[in-house]
Image: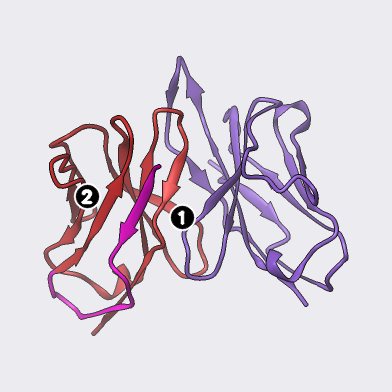
Chain colours: A red, B purple
Amino acid sequence: GNSVTQMEGPVTLSEEAFLTINCTYTATGYPSLFWYVQYPGEGLQLLLKATKADDKGSNKGFEATYRKETTSFHLEKGSVQVSDSAVYFCALKTSYDKVIFGPGTSLSVIP
Amino acid sequence: EAGVVQSPRYKIIEKKQPVAFWCNPISGHNTLYWYRQNLGQGPELLIRYENEEAVDDSQLPKDRFSAERLKGVDSTLKIQPAELGDSAVYLCASSLVYQRENYEQYFGPGTRLTVT
């Protein structure tokens, strides 16, 4: 079946530290991959996406590369800010347009 | 542009009581989704509508949950009767599906349900 696994949180980093949140997936076919972000008190927002192998999604300084050989889509940012504190969800979209989310990883950035 | 609107934002009810959630999608979006998000987990799809038609309700517990999307715009999700395990955040999302291409889903802020 289709599933998404993320590194467990919470993750706590100092401002300007490097961020990696690991995400691996299991899927039949060729899914699209996404990172969503949920800021405190707000709804989920699409952060970035990649639709095929070797694509790199990027937005707001965040990046993730679709790695088919390792079935991974790790989220990275070179220098985090306090405003990046949120919960991050990795997700895949199947060929039937069904989106499956990972459990989320909570990030806290301290000044 | 207004986003996805949900109401109420919070609801506390006793078990065995009925409850209803309302969603108004982004104008022009023909596809609407209801998700349930348990604490510490990602959202799980309950039902998906394309216009008025429910095209995927395989994860909807039909013994107590029902949903409708009259006129292909607003939608209501109902639970009757509620159980303790239904405590969760119920999210509504909408997107535009055009020429077999499904564009980004936009999420509402959710309704946090507590069943006591």
What kind of residue is marked 1?
A: Leu
Tell me if residue A8 is in the magenta stretch. yes
Secondary element at image label 2: loop
Q: Residue at x 19, y 78 (%)?
A: A15
Disc 1 crowd, CA 10 A, few/some/many (<14, 14-19, 20+): many
Which numbered marker is on residue B112?
none
In the rendered image, which residue does mark 1 sit on? Answer: A44
**Residue with the most extreme right position:** B17
In the image, is residue A5 above or below residue A2?
Answer: below
Q: Give whichever of B35, A17 is nearer the camera.
A: B35
Magenta region: which residues? A1-18
Q: Quadrant of residue B32?
A: top right
Disc 2 crowd, CA 10 A, few/some/many (<14, 14-19, 20+): many
Do pointers 1 and 2 mark residues of a single chain?
Answer: yes
Q: Residue at x 85, y 59 (%)?
A: B81
Q: Quadrant of residue A71?
A: top left
The quarter of the picture where the C terminus of chain B appears is bottom right
Tell me if residue A13 is in the magenta stretch. yes
Number of numbered tags placed on the structure image: 2
**Residue with the most extreme top position:** B99
Q: Is residue A17 left or right of residue B50?
A: left
Secondary element at image label 1: strand
Which one is closest to the eye, mark 1 or mark 2?
A: 2
Q: Is residue A15 left or right of residue B15?
A: left
Q: Is residue A29 left or right of residue A58?
A: right
**Residue with the most extreme front position:** A1
In the rendered image, which residue does mark 2 sit on? Answer: A73
In the image, is residue B113 above or below residue A13?
Answer: above
What kind of residue is marked 2?
A: Phe
Q: Residue at x 42, y 37 (%)?
A: B104
Kindly identify which chain the residue marked by label 2 belongs to. Answer: A
